[in-house]
C-alpha cells in the first residue's frame, strides 16, 4: 500500500471504529445547531505537500464556531503584535468552561483567546480599514487559511443572535472592566457572524495544516501569517484549546487542538499535518465525543504525541 493510501485507510478505519461510539449530544443552546445530523462523521488530513485525505462526511458544511478562535487570534497578532494584543487578552488556561465569566483579577482581561470572553475581545480588536470593514477582513482571513472563499450561514447567525444573551452579558462585563475595545453589541454581532462561517472538515484540516506549516497554506502556497504568529497560536491552543479538558488532552493526545460546539475539532502536527474531524455529539465540556476518540487513537497508534 502506498503512503497516501495508508493515510486514507487509517482515516476510514477511525470512522468505522468510532462511528458508533455512543455518548454526547449535539449542542442546542444555539437552536439551529440542534438540527445537525448526529451520525455525520467526517475526518480529514492535509499534509505539508498540500495533499488532502478524507473519510466519511468530510465535505459536509457546518459552522466553524469556536474553531475560528485561534485563526482570529492569529489575525489580531498579525495586525497588532503580541504586546498590544496581550494588553487586552491573556494567555493562561482558565480551567473553566468555554462560556465562563473569565476576567483576570488585577488586569480585568479575559484569561485567553480560546474562551468566549477572550475571543469576543480578540474579534473586537480587528480594526476596519478604509477599504475593508472588520468582518470582511475576518472572513477573508478565514478563507485564506482554508484556501477558498467562505460564507456565513445566516440561519445559524440569526439563531445565535436571538439566544446569545450570555455572550452579550460577557461583553458588557468586559466593558465594565475596561478591556472591551469597541461597543459590546458590535463586538458580539461580529463574533456571532465569525462563529457562523461555514466550513467542511477538509477546510478545517487545511486551516490546521496552515498553522502546522508556519502560517503557509500548503495547498495554495499563500503565506497567511508569519511563522512567529503561527507558533504563538499553537502555544495557546496547546494550553487552552480544549477548555477545561486542555491538560488531559495534552497529556494523552499531545497535539495543539481546538474544538467547536457544532462538532468540529482540529489538531496540529507541527511541520507534519493538519487534522480535522466533524461529529456533532458533544461531551459536557463542549468537545466532540467521536472526534476526540478518533484523534486520541490516531495519536496513540502513530506516535503523534509531541512530548
Ligand atoms: O459563543 C458560543 O457559544 C458559540 N458561538 C461558540 C462556542 C464554541 O464553539 C465552544 N466550543 N466548544
Image: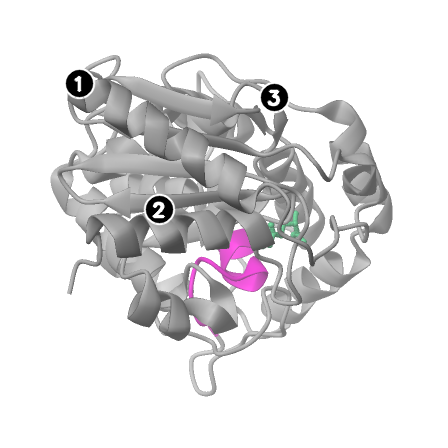
Please give the range of residues in magenta. 109-122
The reply to whether callout 1 and callout 3 are in contact (CB within 8 Å) is no
The reply to whether callout 3 and callout 2 are in contact (CB within 8 Å) is no
Q: What separation in Å lies between label 1 and label 3 (alpha carbons)?
A: 27 Å
Residue 117, magenta (yes or no) = yes
> According to the image, label 2 marks what residue?
267
Secondary structure beneath dot 2 equals strand
- Nearer to us of marks 1 and 3 is 1
Tell me the residue at 44%/40% (across/down): 14
**Residue 60: assigned label:** 3
The reply to whether callout 1 and callout 2 are in contact (CB within 8 Å) is no
> According to the image, label 1 marks what residue?
2
Measured as percent of width and height from the top left, residue 210 is found at 26, 31
Q: What separation in Å lies between label 3 and label 2 (alpha carbons)?
A: 19 Å
Q: What separation in Å lies between label 1 and label 2 (alpha carbons)?
A: 24 Å
Say whether residue 122 is visible. no
Residue with the most extreme front position: 1
Position of the C terminus by quadrant: bottom left
Residue nearest the observer in this picture, 12 or 213: 12
Q: Answer with left or right where residue 152 lies relative to residue 130.
A: right
Measured as percent of width and height from the top left, residue 90 is found at 37, 69
Measured as percent of width and height from the top left, residue 191 is found at 61, 43
- The answer to which of marks 1 and 3 sits earlier in the sequence is 1
Secondary structure beneath dot 1 equals loop
Amino acid at each position: 500500500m502506498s503512503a497516501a493510501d495508508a493515510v486514507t485507510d487509517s482515516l476510514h478505519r477511525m470512522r468505522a471504529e468510532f462511528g458508533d461510539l455512543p455518548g454526547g449530544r449535539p449542542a442546542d443552546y444555539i437552536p439551529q445547531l440542534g438540527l445537525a445530523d448526529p451520525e455525520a462523521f467526517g475526518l480529514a488530513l492535509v499534509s505539508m505537500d498540500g495533499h488532502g485525505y478524507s473519510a466519511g462526511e468530510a465535505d459536509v458544511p457546518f459552522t466553524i464556531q469556536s474553531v475560528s478562535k485561534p485563526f482570529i487570534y492569529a489575525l489580531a497578532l498579525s495586525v497588532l503584535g503580541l504586546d498590544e494584543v496581550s494588553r487586552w487578552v491573556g494567555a493562561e488556561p482558565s480551567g473553566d468552561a468555554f462560556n465562563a465569566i473569565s476576567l483576570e483579577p488585577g488586569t480585568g482581561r479575559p484569561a485567553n483567546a480560546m474562551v468566549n470572553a477572550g475571543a469576543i475581545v480578540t474579534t473586537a480588536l480587528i480594526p476596519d480599514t478604509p477599504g475593508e470593514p472588520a468582518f470582511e477582513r475576518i472572513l477573508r482571513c478565514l478563507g485564506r487559511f482554508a484556501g477558498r472563499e467562505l460564507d456565513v450561514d445566516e440561519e445559524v447567525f440569526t439563531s445565535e443572535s436571538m439566544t446569545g444573551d450570555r455572550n452579550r452579558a460577557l461583553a458588557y462585563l468586559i466593558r465594565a472592566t475596561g478591556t472591551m475595545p469597541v461597543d459590546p453589541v458590535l463586538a458580539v454581532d461580529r463574533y456571532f457572524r465569525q462563529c457562523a462561517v461555514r466550513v467542511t472538515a477538509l477546510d478545517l484540516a487545511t486551516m490546521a495544516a496552515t498553522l502546522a506549516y508556519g502560517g503557509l497554506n500548503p495547498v495554495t502556497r499563500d503565506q497567511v501569517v508569519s511563522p512567529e504568529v503561527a507558533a504563538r497560536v499553537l502555544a495557546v491552543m496547546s494550553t487552552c484549546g480544549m477548555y477545561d479538558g486542555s491538560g488531559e488532552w495534552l497529556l494523552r493526545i499531545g497535539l495543539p487542538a481546538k474544538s467547536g460546539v457544532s462538532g468540529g475539532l482540529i489538531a496540529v502536527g507541527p511541520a507534519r499535518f493538519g487534522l480535522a474531524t466533524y461529529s456533532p455529539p458533544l461531551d459536557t465540556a463542549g468537545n466532540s465525543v467521536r472526534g476526540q476518540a478518533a484523534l486520541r487513537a490516531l495519536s496513540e497508534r502513530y506516535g503523534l504525541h509531541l512530548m
